[in-house]
Amino acid sequence: VFKIEAMQKIGKVEAWIGQGNWLYMSIPDTSIDAGQLAELRKCPLVSGMEFFRYGSSVQVTLQLNQKFDHVGVLTYPGDNNVYVVLYRFTEGL
């Protein structure tokens, strides 16, 4: 689980896993605190990181050093933070 702390409520975050174990997150109508994102580099699952600004949106891209099958984005009422959850499918379930 990754937590993205937000100063204000942000819109729908889109997230997907692409080729090469890259996790892409598109965050609308926001700006990014590069210092806060640097904390993600300390996560043992992250081997690389890039972020780009597209108009009023930001794309955060993380290189994962493990394979994941699905990504989900969670938000909670009264909480501005965004939680990104990575899933791995296991056989027999």
Image: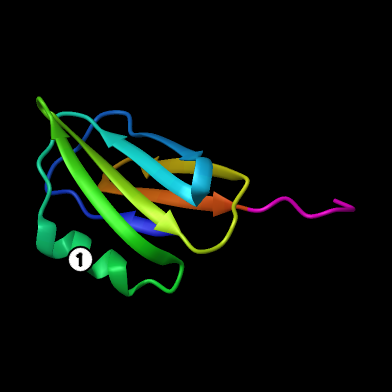
Residue farthest front in this picture: 20
Label 1: which residue? Answer: 38
Residue farthest top in this picture: 55
Q: Is residue 7 left or right of residue 83?
A: left
Say which quarter of the image contains residue 76: top left
Residue 35 pos. (x, y %): 11, 64
Q: Is mark 1 on a helix, strand or loop?
A: helix
Q: Is residue 90 magenta?
A: yes
Above or below for 66 versus 78: below
Q: Most prominent secondary structure in the magenta stretch?
A: loop
Q: In this view, does 19 lie to the left or right of 83?
A: right
Residue plotted at (32% across, 29% down): 12
* Range of magenta residues: 88-93
Residue 89 pos. (x, y %): 72, 50
Colour scheme employed for the rendering of this structure:
rainbow
Residue farthest right in this picture: 92
Q: Hey, what amino acid is under mark 1?
A: Ala
Above or below for 3 versus 78: below
Residue 86 pos. (x, y %): 53, 52
